[in-house]
Image: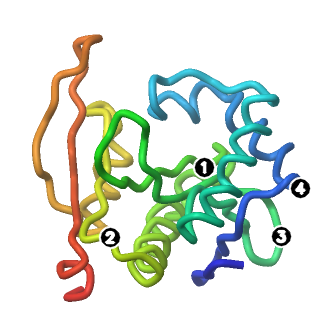
Amino acid sequence: MMFETDRLYARHLGPQDLDGLAELCADPIAMQYMDDGSTLTREQCNGWIGICQLKYDQRGYGTSAIIEKGTDAFVGFCGVVRAPDHDFDEIIYALSQDFWGKGYATEIARGMLDYVFSVSELDAIWSTINHDNDASLKIMDKLNMRFDHDAAEDDGGITKYYVITREEWAAL
């Protein structure tokens, strides 16, 4: 286990999470705002678990399994990652629809920010949010992440960039 919150805990993704991860990543509604909105196959999820395990060894963090206390249900994933086309680390998360509306995304994202700032030397953690993703835009406010800028995408959409620095996080 990496860390826990009042209702959840985060741990390294492993083979035992493949079923839950594959189910989540096959859901087009749950995945609509992740990367380009595409779903992932079971094989892609299995490969992702392997990549995550390498990141834990290299950096001490990555994308993690989110588990509900008491039920041990796979809720989703959350982590701080560096996309190949970015020069910054960003927080990502996705939860199975059964767990939406409970405040879990905010709870686990807050815990992840705290954890990664404690085990890394990152000066800032970013978030990129599709301008239509109202739920995640509200979460940015709850996490005290500040809006930095908008960027136009090739498909005509807008991505909103949020950031929080180590100093800003420590002051909370």
Residue 104: image location, x then y, percent? 54, 64
What is the secondary structure assignment of the residue under circle 3? loop
Outermost residue on the bottom side: it is 171
Q: Which label was assigned to residue 71?
A: 3
Horizontal side of 132 relative to 75 (left or right) equals left
* Picture quadrant where residue 42 is located: top right
Which mark is nearer the camera, 4 or 2?
2
Horizontal side of 21 relative to 38 (left or right) equals right
Between 134 and 37, the one nearer to me in the picture: 37
Going from N to C along the chain, the mark reached first, 1 or 2, is 1
Quadrant showing the C terminus: bottom left
Against 16, is 104 above or below? below
Q: Name the amino acid, label 1.
A: Leu
Q: Name the amino acid, label 3.
A: Thr
Between 95 and 170, the one nearer to me in the picture: 170
Residue under numbered circle 4: 16
Going from N to C along the chain, the mark reached first, 3 or 4, is 4
Number of marks in picture: 4
Residue 14: image location, x then y, percent? 81, 57
Residue under numbered circle 2: 122
Which mark is nearer the camera, 1 or 4?
4
Q: Residues within 10 Å of mark 4 (few under 14, many from 20)?
A: few
Which mark is nearer the camera, 2 or 3?
2
Which mark is nearer the camera, 1 or 2?
2
Q: Which label was assigned to residue 95?
A: 1
What is the secondary structure assignment of the residue under circle 2? loop
* Picture quadrant where residue 6 is located: bottom right
**Distance from label 1 to label 3 (Cα)?**
16 Å
Q: Residues within 10 Å of mark 1 (few under 14, many from 20)?
A: many
